[in-house]
Image: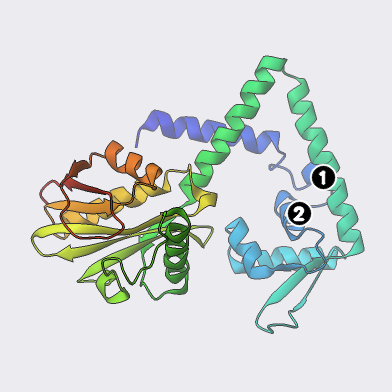
Amino acid sequence: MDEVMIAQVRRFNRVVTQQVGALTDRFLARDRPLGESRLLWEIGSGSDGRDVRSLRTALDLDSGYVSRLLRSLEASGLVTTERSPADRRVTLARLTEAGEAEKDVLDERSDELATQLLEALNEGQRDRLVAAMAEVERLLTAATVRIAPADPEDPAARHCLRAYAAELNERFETGFDPGRSIRADAADLRPPAGLLLLATLHEAPVGCGALKFHGTEPAELKRMWVDGSARGLGVGRRLLAELERRATAAGAPAVRLETNAALTEAIALYRSAGYVETDAFNDEPYAHHWFEKALPPG
C-alpha cells in the first residue's frame, strides 16, 4: 500500500478524533467518554429497546467491551437491561427516563458542535466540507463490507438467494421462476462443483455471487445480487473480481454468464469489467444477452 496514502489516512484520523472530542473522557462536556455516549445514542428511546447483539454488530465492538459500557450506564441510572420476554436468549437494553433526557442533551450538544464547525467556514467551504463528509462516509461504509465464501444453506446465504429471486420476479417482464431457469442448486454451489460468496455489512448480508465449475471449461457466473441498501458502494464489482480470482485459481480459462435485458445495471457492470457479448451458449429462457471474459492462467 502507498505510504503517502497511509500517512494521509492517519492525519485525517487524528484531526477527526480531536474535532469530535474523542480524546477526552468527558465527551461533549458530559461525565462519560465517547464510547458510552455513542452506545447511549444507539440504544435510542424506543420502548422496545435494542437487542444487545445488534448493538455489538452496529458498532463493531466485542461483547466484553459492550458489557462493560452497559454496566457503567446501568450504574449511572441511564440504562436497564433484561431478557426479552419473546426469547430468553436475547438481552434487551432500554433507556431509562434519565437516559432519554441525557440522550436529548447529547443530541443538542452534537448539533452545537456541528454548527460551530460549519460557522467557522464560508458558504463555499461549508458545501465542500459537507459533500466531502458524505463521500468519506460512503467510502468508509464500502470498506466495511466483507466478502467470504458461505454455504448455500446458511441462513444469510438463503436470505440473499431468496431476495435475488424475488427481485428478478419483480423486474422481469414475464416474472421469474427458478424452476424454469438453468439449475444452480445448493449442491451446484458447493466445492468442488462451485462456490458461493457472501457480502456482509456489519454482519448483515447485503449481496452474493456464485460460480459453477466445469473442469477446464469456462466457469458459469450465477446468482449475482446486491441489496438496494448497499448499491453504489462497489459491492457488485468486488464480488465479481473475487469470483474471477477464484475461477482463475480453479483453473477455469474464462467466465461465462447470461443475463436479462431488464438488468441494465448488471450489463453495464459486466461490460465495464471486460466481458464481451457472445452468441448464445445455452438455452436459458430468461436470457437476452450472453457474455464471456477470458481469464489469465491460474
Amino acid at the residue labelled 1? Asp
**Residue 277 seen in render:** yes
The answer to whether mark 1 and mark 2 are in CB contact below 8 A is yes
Residue 284: quadrant of the picture? bottom left
Residue 144: x %, y % from top left? 49, 50
Horizontal side of 58 relative to 156 (left or right) equals: right
**Residue 251 seen in render:** no
Q: Neighbour class for label 1 at 10 Å: few (<14), some, many (≥20)?
A: some
Residue 74's place in the image compared with 20, above or below, is below
Residue 11: x %, y % from top left? 54, 31
Residue 26: x %, y % from top left? 79, 46
Residue 111: quadrant of the picture? top right
- Which residue lies under the disc numbered 2? 41
Disc 1 is placed on an element classified as helix
List the single residue furthest toward the front.
174
- Name the residue rendered at 46%, 58% in the picture: 167
Residue 169: x %, y % from top left? 44, 61
Name the quarter where the N terminus is drawn.
Answer: top left
The tag earlier along the polypeptide, 1 or 2, is 2
- Which residue lies under the disc numbered 1? 107
